[in-house]
Amino acid sequence: MATIMVVDDDENCRLLLGAILRSSGHEVIEAENGKVGLEVYLQNSIDLIITDIFMPLMDGIDLLAAVLSRHPDRKMIAISGGYKAMNAQLILKMAQSFGAIDIISKPFQIVTVVEKVEMALQR
């Protein structure tokens, strides 16, 4: 299967996504923010990145830009529940404009994560 990196500052979300992806047969690498995620990405062969948008040190948009500037064909999915007065769908659509191939809103359904990951890997 694929090697997928999950980047999210919410440990519970990261662990849940990791468990879902591992149960689907994927290898999962976790990172707690975009800065660590970029460092891990540069040292590993990653097939797909799932990144939260709002995180400390480096947010998901900056991670998208940094990865895609190096590897424009890298597959990335953005995930968010919004932030303060910012609507999650608006933020996720912005992530798509920066190069995310798909989006997932929090809270998410397990089946949605599995379907979107499989579709992204088939692209």
Image (cartoon, helix red, strand yellow):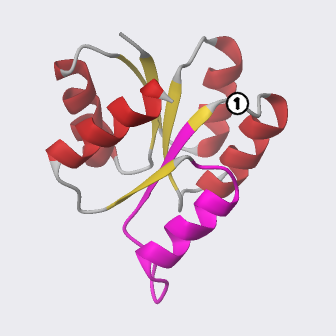
Whether 108 is among the magenta residues is no
Q: Amino acid at mark 1?
A: Asp
Q: Position of residue 85 (x, y in %)?
A: 46, 90
Residue 5 appears in the rendering: no
Q: Quadrant of residue 88?
A: bottom left
Q: Quadrant of residue 11?
A: top left
Q: Is residue 14 left or right of residue 72?
A: left
* Image vertical order of residue 8 relative to residue 27, above or below: below
Q: Is residue 20 left or right of residue 37?
A: left
* Image vertical order of residue 108 relative to residue 29, above or below: below
Q: Position of residue 15 (x, y in %)?
A: 26, 35
Residue 69 appears in the rendering: yes
Q: Which residues are magenta?
A: 76-100
Whether 86 is among the magenta residues is yes
- The residue sitting at 34% across, 30% down in the picture is 118
Q: Quadrant for the N terminus, please.
A: top left
Q: Position of residue 98 (x, y in %)?
A: 70, 57
- The residue sitting at 53% across, 58% down in the picture is 53
- The residue sitting at 67% across, 62% down in the picture is 97
* Image vertical order of residue 61 relative to residue 20, above or below: below
